């Protein structure tokens, strides 16, 4: 669908219907939904995982001139991860299932630059810096039993659960295509990002991610309002 939207933007750019002016502001909403799963291992030691993540990002920006803009927004993130591990050691079978639910609200500031490409199609690159809190709820179930007809042992089971809140600082450089099909309404397609994230100040736990995979592209809409006199 994201590639189809990209094609529509390129084909539909036939006339200039939207021009940016100093003082204009734009209300935006974009996001994406990611669902994937994988499995590996052998019969005696098998691991499966599935991941679901929804991200929504409302924002508002104002133009300092016909190209340069700045604004504020927030990333609203919900994630669910399910992991299952089955391990067979001789005649003992063990299974562990772990469910991880995460959510975060990350307010951010951003600035960027609009470049007209083909009439009503624009490219913009924007840099954003955000700070928020990542809340994680983890639940783990562990069960085991001896298999085989000669066994007389009883099955064992245990459950553990814990929560964690982690401060989160993130910066990202985001390329984006914007197609205005009227003077006020437009569609956006985020093409990935280059990110630097820090999760723990004390341990300096951080990561750098460069990802332009279409799976992670963001789809959204924009509403442009003229300068308020």
Image (cartoon, helix red, strand yellow):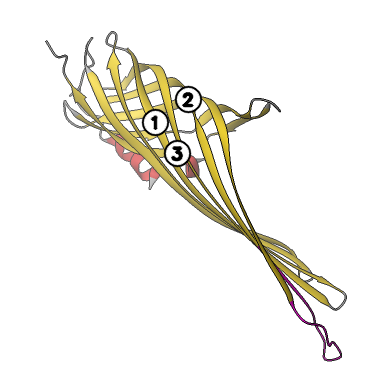
Report if the CB atoms under discs 1 and 3 are less than 8 Å apart. no
Report the disc number at residue 217: 3
Report the disc number at residue 130: 2
- Classified by dominant secondary structure, the portion drawn in magenta counts as loop
The residue nearer to you, when weighing 61 against 145, is 145
Q: SS of the residue at dot 3?
A: loop
For marks 2 and 3, the one nearer the N-term is 2
Q: Nearer the viewer, mark 1 or mark 3?
A: 1
Quadrant position of residue 77:
top left
Q: Read off the residue under disc 1.
A: 74
Quadrant position of residue 28:
top left
The residue nearer to you, when weighing 27 against 141, is 141
Segment colored magenta: 141-155
Q: Quadrant of the C terminus?
A: top left
Q: Is residue 16 above or below residue 22?
A: below
Question: What is the distance, in whole Å, between disc 1 and disc 3 at their CAs?
Answer: 17 Å
For marks 2 and 1, the one nearer the N-term is 1
Circle count = 3
Mark 1 crowdedness (10 Å alpha carbons): few <14, some 14-19, many ≥20: many
Question: What is the distance, in whole Å, between disc 2 and disc 3 at their CAs?
Answer: 19 Å
For marks 1 and 3, the one nearer the N-term is 1
């Amino acid at each position: 669908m994201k590639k189809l939207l990209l094609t529509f933007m390129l084909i539909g750019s036939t006339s200039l219907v939207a021009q940016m002016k100093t003082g204009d502001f734009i209300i935006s909403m974009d996001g994406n939904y990611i669902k994937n799963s994988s499995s590996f291992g052998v019969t005696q030691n098998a691991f499966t995982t599935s991941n679901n993540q929804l991200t929504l990002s409302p924002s508002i920006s104002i133009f300092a001139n016909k190209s340069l803009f700045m604004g504020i927004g927030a990333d609203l993130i919900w994630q669910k991860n399910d992991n299952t591990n089955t391990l067979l050691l001789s005649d003992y079978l063990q299974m562990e299932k772990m469910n991880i639910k995460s959510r975060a609200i990350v307010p951010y500031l951003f600035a960027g630059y609009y470049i007209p490409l083909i009439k009503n199609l624009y490219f913009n690159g924007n840099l954003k810096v955000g700070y928020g809190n990542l809340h994680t709820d983890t639940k783990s179930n562990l069960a085991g039993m001896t298999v085989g007809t000669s066994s007389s042992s009883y099955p064992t089971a245990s459950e553990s659960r814990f929560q964690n809140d982690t401060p989160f600082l993130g910066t990202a450089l985001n390329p984006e295509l914007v197609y205005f099909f009227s003077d006020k309404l437009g569609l956006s397609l985020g093409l990935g990002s280059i990110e630097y994230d820090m999760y723990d100040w004390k341990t300096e736990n951080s990561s750098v991610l460069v990802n332009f995979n279409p799976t992670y592209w963001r789809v959204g809409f924009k509403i442009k309002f003229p300068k308020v006199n």
